[in-house]
Image (spheres, helix red, strand yellow):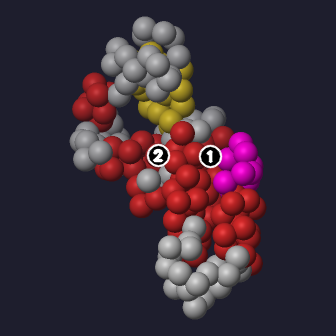
């Protein structure tokens, strides 16, 4: 890439990460470029680099200052950590897709299948508590005679917990 960065998508060409430094509280956060692109697209914000630099706030809980310094780190050494986080995000969202599909299965189909069990196992390290996952499995194992006997509420709690814990959950699951 020759020239200045014009858009967030330009960061893909130089495999850059984004570092946001709050000038008020001093908090520094590395942000995966794909997460930032998805975030801006979801909120219908501009992907223009100058707009992103002017509009990003401190990501520290409670601060939310807009007085930040945003910089792109080309060929970032933290790329390995960011790739790991991106893979983790993809894995969590795939597990959530399996659980959502299972929660909306008709009564005639079994919910307690091996793919659901695997998805619950994948999400276990990220949840902090296994109570909701256990409730989801208990409902999936029980026989269902009525339409209201499903895992919709448990699925919503799982997705909300992941969002509250700071994981990038797709908008379909929020």
Q: In this orientation, does residue 49 appear? A: yes
Q: Is residue 139 magenta?
A: no
Q: Position of residue 146 (x, y in %)?
A: 53, 81
Label 2 environment density (alpha carbons within 10 Å; few <14, some 14–19, many ≥20): some
Contact, mark 2 vs mark 1 (Cβ under 8 Å): yes
**In terms of secondary structure, what is the magenta stretch mainly?**
helix
Q: Quadrant of residue 4?
A: top left
Q: CA distance from mark 2 to mark 1?
A: 10 Å
Residue at position x 57%, y 67% in the image: 151
SS of the residue at dot 1?
helix
Report the magenta residues as a range: 122-132
Q: Is residue 96 above or below residue 81?
A: below
Instruction: Based on the picture, tell me whether residue 130 belongs to the magenta stretch.
Output: yes
Q: Residue placed at 28% from the left, 25% from the top?
A: 54
Is 28 on the left or on the right of 88, as rendered? left
Task: Indicate left or right for 50 with 80 as reference.
Answer: left
Image spot of residue 21 (x, y percent): 47, 19
Badge 1 density bin: few <14, some 14–19, many ≥20, Cα 10 Å: some
Label disc, if present, on residue 159 of the rendered structure: none
Q: Please tell me whether mark 2 sits on a helix, a strand or a loop.
A: helix
Q: Nearer the viewer, residue 35 or 99?
A: 99
29 w.r.t. 127: above or below: above
Q: Which numbered dot is residue 85?
A: 1
In the rendered view of the protein, which quadrant contains the N terminus? Answer: top left
Nearer-N-terminus badge (2/1): 2
Residue that carries the numbered disc 2 in the rendered image = 35
- Residues 61 and 56: in front is 61
Numbered circles on residues, count? 2
Decide which of 28, 14 is in the foreground and name it: 28
Task: Point out residue 83 in the picture as x, y percentages from the top left corner.
Answer: 62, 48
């Amino acid at each position: 890439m020759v020239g200045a960065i014009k858009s967030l998508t330009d960061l893909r060409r130089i495999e850059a990460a984004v570092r946001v430094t709050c000038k008020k509280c001093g908090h520094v956060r590395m942000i995966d470029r794909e997460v930032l692109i998805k975030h801006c697209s979801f909120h219908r914000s501009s992907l223009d680099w100058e707009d992103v630099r002017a509009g990003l706030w401190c990501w520290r809980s409670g601060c939310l200052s807009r007085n930040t310094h945003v910089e792109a780190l080309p060929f970032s050494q933290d790329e390995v950590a960011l790739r790991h986080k991106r893979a983790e995000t993809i894995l969590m969202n795939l597990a959530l897709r399996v659980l959502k599909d299972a929660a909306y299965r008709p009564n005639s189909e079994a919910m307690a299948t091996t793919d659901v069990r695997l998805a619950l196992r994948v999400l276990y390290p990220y949840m902090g508590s296994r109570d909701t996952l256990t409730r989801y499995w208990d409902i999936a194992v029980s026989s269902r005679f009525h339409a209201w006997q499903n895992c919709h509420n448990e699925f919503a709690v799982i997705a909300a917990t992941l969002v509250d814990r700071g994981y990038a959950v797709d908008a379909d699951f929020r």
